[in-house]
Amino acid sequence: MLVIGAVVIRVTDLEGQIGFWTRALDYVVREPVDDDFALLRPREGEGPAVSLDAHHSERVLPPRIHLDLYAEDQRAEVARLAELGAREVPWDRRPVDADYVIMEDPEGNRFCVIDAEGWTGWAARRLR
């Protein structure tokens, strides 16, 4: 059996991205931090780690993979993430009744903020 232990995000500004993602997810840094790598883990409870890997990577749009972040209060989380430096990504094919908002971190790594209302998966259950 396999489980996801960490999702790795390629970054340019390691310190800046540590600041964004620790605040965005309420994660903490596992010490020590290398010059080009940091592992972030949930402050409390369980969940996958996020590793930040400071190596050049070509940006591809649409990205081949992205994070789906579940939120109890989607509107409040989108606003909070924007205050941290994320930005909403407009997409003309997004359905009117979509339960997600596409965003990107300060370096352009995309993720979605999902309205957890009605979801029953482990991520949504963890929020309740």
Image (cartoon, helix red, strand yellow):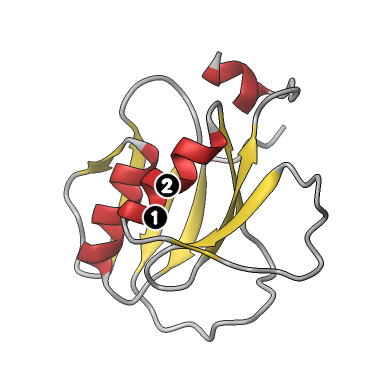
State how many labels appear: 2
**Whole-percent x, y for residue 110 in the image:** 55, 64
- Spatial separation of the CA atoms under disc 2 and disc 1: 5 Å
* Structural crowding at the residue carrying mark 1, measured as other residues with C-alpha within 10 Å and reported as few (<14), some (14–19) or many (≥20): some
Q: Residue at x 40, y 49 (%)?
A: 81
Secondary structure found at label 1 = helix
Q: What residue sits right under mark 1 in the picture?
A: 82
Q: Element under label 2?
A: helix
Residue under the point 64% across and 40% down: 114
Q: Are marks 2 and 1 in contact (CB under 8 Å)?
A: yes
Q: Position of residue 38 (x, y in %)?
A: 29, 56
In the depicted structure, whether residue 38 falls above or below residue 70? below
Image position, residue 55 (x, y; %):
38, 78
Amino acid on which the number 2 mark rests in the picture:
Ala
Q: Is residue 96 left or right of residue 66?
A: right
Query: Vertically, is 101 above or below 63?
Result: above
Give the crowd class for mark 2: few <14, some 14-19, many >=20 residues within 10 Å: few
**What residue is shown with label 2?**
79
Picture quadrant of residue 1: top right
For badge 1, the amino acid type reads: Ala
Q: Quadrant of residue 20?
A: bottom left
Name the residue rendered at 55%, 26% in the picture: 72
Indicate the quadrant containing the C terminus: top left, top right, bottom left or bottom right: top right
- Of residue 38 and residue 127, the one placed in the foreground of this image is 127
In the rendered view, does 63 fall on the left or right side of 6? right
Q: Residue at x 55, y 82 (%)?
A: 59
Asked if residue 119 is positioned above or below residue 85 in the image, the reply reads above
Give how far across and how far down residue 41 sits, in percent. 36, 37
